[in-house]
Each structure stands twice: as C-alpha cells, then as structure tokens.
C-alpha cells in the first residue's frame, strides 16, 4: 500500500517550507554525500548513539567483515572525525540518506503528507514541528539502542524520524482524508487512518522483530515509532486550528 497523493482541495498556503526540505535532502545526498559515494562525509555526520550518550567524538578504523549468509568479505568503514559537536549530528543526520531508494521513499511520504501539515500549522510552526519530531525520533533510537544493548557505534541517518512525526500529526488531524495509494497494480483511495495505520503496524512489527539484535536491515524502526508518537502528542501544541486565511474569512462573514 504505497501512498502517491491525497486530497489537497482545502489547501490555502503554498507549502514552500516542505519544498525546501525536499530540495535540501536531495542536494545533500547528491552534492555532499556524492550519491552515497562519500562514506567519510556520511559517517562523520550521522548520529552515532555512543557519541550522543557520551558527548564525545569516536573515531574508529575500518575493518574487514564477513557476510554470514554469503561468506563474502567486505570492508566496514570506520567512524570519522565529526565536524563541530557530536550533538549536532542529531540534526545533520536528518538530511542524509543511505541510497536512492531510502531517499525516494522518504521524500515520497514527505511530498504527500507534509504539505497538509504545513497548510494547517503555517510555515514557521511546521518547520519547528518537523525538526522537533525528528530530534525526538533520533533520541528515541539512541536510548533504545542503549537499553537493548545493541551496537552503540552503528550510525543512523535519514529523514524517516521527522517524516514519521508528520505522519503522526496527519493521522490525528485528518483521519478520514482520502489518500490515493498504489495497491496490487491499481490505484485506490482509502481513508488516512487505513493508509497510515497499515504503515505504523509495519513499523511496530519490524521493530519487534529487531529486539533480539541490531535494527533489522540497518533500519532504525525505534526512530520511526518514536517520531510517530511524538507527532501524535505534539501536533495539538503546534496546531492553532484552521489556516489563517480560512479563519479570517469566517471572521469576516460572521460579522
């Protein structure tokens, strides 16, 4: 069930902050990460739980690992020097991705659901909501990694946590809004509560399967769940109701 669009008939604001966030993610991946080729930049600016917990930069050497399934050897890059304080990686990691599929999947969700939240909150509140839920998502991953005894030196990156916050806010504000999804070679419209409910169930199931070891497939499902819950909880603190233009129109006609 892949979302490809939703009902934007009530949109009164141009979601330029959402467009900027999408553009920044693309520009960072293409020009700074060099489409994933610059491992040094990526590892130095990703969130490393061990660094966040200690507040200190950790530099390690690369090492040769063996794939347990194929027996093939591969080189695991070491952690590089972090420019600035390591806590800033909680923000920088939100604008980096592990590959084209990672980038495309995240930006598709941001494109479909972010504009509605920006229309409701306004540009500035939307930006702060996005960054705050992303920050909480990253911290959730860090604390979960420590609590479960997982490897504290595995970097995490991606906009998934912040976008999960957007999805949580969307579900609470627009549970019945029609979302167009690609399903079994056809496109159907379903309520948001069904489309996003399916998504969060997958995150919970995948997150539960990772409890016995490191995050499955390198995906920080705890960050997804933490961001989603943060979005559900915080959206009402950021939401002032209808967009300003709509409120002003109602005030005018109710005089």
Image (cartoon, rainbow, N blue to C red):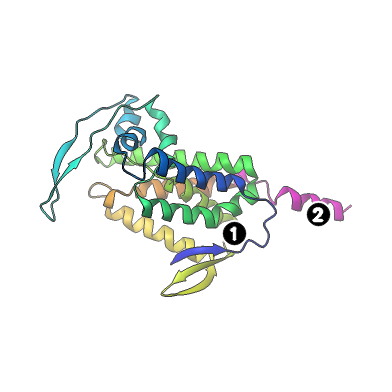
Vertical position of residue 198 compared to residue 88: above or below: below
**Crowd band around label 1 with a 10 angstrom C-alpha radius: few (<14), some (14–19), many (20+):** some
Instruction: Identify the residue at horizontal 26%, vertical 32% (top origin).
Output: 79
Of callouts 2 and 1, the N-terminal one: 1
Instruction: Identify the residue at horizontal 26%, vertical 35% (top origin).
Output: 153
Look at the image and give the residue range highlighted in magenta: 236-255
Decide which of 229, 102 is in the foreground and name it.
102
Question: What secondary structure predominates along the stretch shown in magenta?
Answer: helix
Q: Identify the image quadrant of the N terminus.
A: bottom left
The answer to whether residue 49 is left or right of residue 96 is left
**Picture disc at residue 250:** 2
Question: Is 242 contained in the magenta span?
Answer: yes
Residue 40, horizontal then vertical, whole percent: 30, 34
**Picture disc at residue 174:** 1
Residue 171, horizontal then vertical, whole percent: 54, 57
Question: Is 123 contained in the magenta span?
Answer: no
**Crowd band around label 2 with a 10 angstrom C-alpha radius: few (<14), some (14–19), many (20+):** few
């Amino acid at each position: 069930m892949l979302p490809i669009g939703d009902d934007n008939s009530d949109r009164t604001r141009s979601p330029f902050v959402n467009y900027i966030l999408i553009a920044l993610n693309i520009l960072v991946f293409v020009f700074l990460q060099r489409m994933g080729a610059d491992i040094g930049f990526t590892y130095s600016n990703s969130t490393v739980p061990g660094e966040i917990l200690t507040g200190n930069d950790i530099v390690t050497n690369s090492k040769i690992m063996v794939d347990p399934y194929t027996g093939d050897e591969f080189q695991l890059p070491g952690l590089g020097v972090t420019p600035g304080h390591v806590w800033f990686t909680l923000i920088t990691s939100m604008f980096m991705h592990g590959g084209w599929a990672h980038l495309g999947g995240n930006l598709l969700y941001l494109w479909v659901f972010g504009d509605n939240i920006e229309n409701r909150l306004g540009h500035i509140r939307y930006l702060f909501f996005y960054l705050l839920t992303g920050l909480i998502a990253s911290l959730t991953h860090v604390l979960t990694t420590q609590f479960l005894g997982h490897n504290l030196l595995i970097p995490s990156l991606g906009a998934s946590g912040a976008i999960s916050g957007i999805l949580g806010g969307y579900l609470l504000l627009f549970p019945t809004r029609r979302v167009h999804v690609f399903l079994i070679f056809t496109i159907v419209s379903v309520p948001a509560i069904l489309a996003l409910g399916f998504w969060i169930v997958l995150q919970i199931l995948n997150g539960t399967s990772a409890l016995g070891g490191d995050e499955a497939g390198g995906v920080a499902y705890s960050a997804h769940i933490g961001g989603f819950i943060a979005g559900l909880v915080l959206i009402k603190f950021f939401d002032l109701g209808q967009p300003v233009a709509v409120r002003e129109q109602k005030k005018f006609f109710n005089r």
